[in-house]
Amino acid sequence: MQVLPAGPDALLVELPLPAEVPLLYADVCRDLTCADLVPGARTLLLDGVADLDAARDYLAAWVPAGGSADRVGPVVELPTTYDGADLDDVARRWGMTRAEAVATHSGAEHTVAFVGFAPGFAYCTGLPPELSVARLDRPRARVPAGAVGLAGEYTGVYPTASPGGWRLVGRTEARLWDADRDEPALLTPGTRVRFVEVTG
Amino acid sequence: MSRALTVLDAGPLTTVQDGGRRGYAHLGVPRSGWLDAPAARLANRLVGNVAGAALAETTVGGVTFRAEAALTVAVTGAEADVLVDGRGAAWGEPISLPAGAVLRVGPARRGVRSYVAVAGGLDVPPVLGSRSTDRLSGLGPPPLADGQVLPVGPGRRPHPLDVPRVAVTDGVLRVAEGPREDWVRGGARRLVENAWTVAPDSDRVALRLAGPPLDRARSGELPSEGLVLGAVQVPPDGQPLVFLADHPTTGGYPVIGVVALDDLWQCAQLRPGESVGFRHVAG
């Protein structure tokens, strides 16, 4: 673990393994007082830390203890229609038929690694690294809310319509973001996500 | 008549701002909130508001309101002519507006953003606990529009005395070490050694700077990581930017420094073309 400076009341913690980020996030949420905790791909940002010295001591003593059932996040199922404009292209990149690509994506258990880009936009890991796909060379001017896309090692679902460069494989009717709900984001860091194929 | 301000002329960009919506960065929600915090807090104090009351933040061009009831207001931040029904009124002091009076805040004489506080605060519906307009994500109320009626909350008795601060930017930003200083050749020292000017595309998201491009010391991608307010980020073009209240919660370009919180108000008031320098401080 590396603890990097990030201003007067913040620390950026870089972890050796991406899988350790959700573990540290859950532990720091429980044990330290911070204004904001922002998981990234390999990092956890502790921002507005009440006691920096205590936080440094805590981090120095922290060991990842993962895997037990009480440490994993809730499961959210996203009914997904796999009819995205880039599905055939993704299947070809994966060396699969369209049906095999859908089975591969919906068969994986995905986990929200972090949320960024837009409110409620979750970066979900779960596909094996060899299935990483590059972003589109030219982003689309408008991607509709609910579109399910792939970029790099991540699956993401657009919470609201926006420009976007992810390769679209499907869409879900699930409401990803609603600022009036008690929990505005459906997908939060650590949530496990299953994309359940809807046909017809 | 109900306590309200009607927007007669919204100016080029006037938004509602309060202390912002912290605590949602893990959901991708920017913190938002007023850019020149000392000026905004002063305006609220002058009209007797609680510290987090929502007020109006202008951008260079000013704003005109009509008071629909007798209201107390104050203008701070960027200095501007203040007129009530066409007659000069005080900048940086409480002003009593009779019902029907027109308050005009002129274009900023220097600086960028003036703050117009009203006793009781602008009572638009909060989103995630804040009434701030977030220009990045679109959360909060849209920018003010001509003809819009802004409800105003119940007022309290103003403080008897406060001292308006005529703050003059010196363009020097204190910067502490950032997490990815080693990604730029020469590190944060290069920020300090060079002279910068404010780029015209600066906004509530970032103060964008122009100067000799900073060279990357290492190539490759930086996986997305959390960003703090005041982070000095270096995109591929080597022109650094200082992230302000509407900054994205995560980013993939290296952050080589962090501007001191007490200097961020200057970023709210520096105009395109003005000079910016950095002074290194311990983190």
Image (tube, coloured by chain):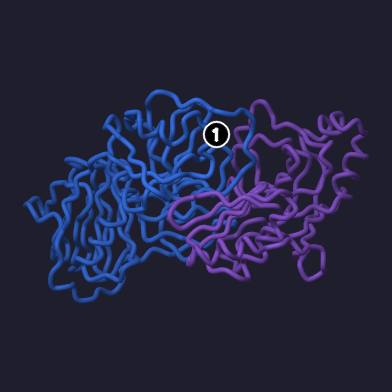
Decide: few, some or many residues near mark 1? Use Cα within 10 Å; few <14, some 14-19, many ≥20. many
Q: Going by the image, does B6 lie left or right of B95?
A: right
Q: Going by the image, does A67 lie left or right of A20?
A: right
Q: Going by the image, does B210 lie left or right of A197?
A: left
Tell me the residue at 50%/38% (across/down): B181
Give x and y (percent) for residue B70.
Answer: 17, 68
The chain shown in blue is which? Answer: B
Tell me the residue at 78%/71% (across/down): A70
The chain shown in purple is which? Answer: A
Front position in the image: A158 or B182: B182
Tell me which amino acid carries mark 1: Trp
Give x and y (percent) for residue B248.
Answer: 52, 46
Count of marks, rendered view:
1
Asked whether residue B97 is in view, the answer is: no
Question: Which chain contains the residue that carries disc 1?
Answer: B
Tell me the residue at 92%/33% (across/down): A96
Front position in the image: A199 or B245: B245
Of all residues, the one furthest to the top in this rendering is: B212
Name the residue carrying label 1.
Answer: B183
Front position in the image: A189 or B180: B180
Quarter of the rendering containing residue A92: top right
Position above or below: A104 against B235: below
Position above or below: B78 against A98: below
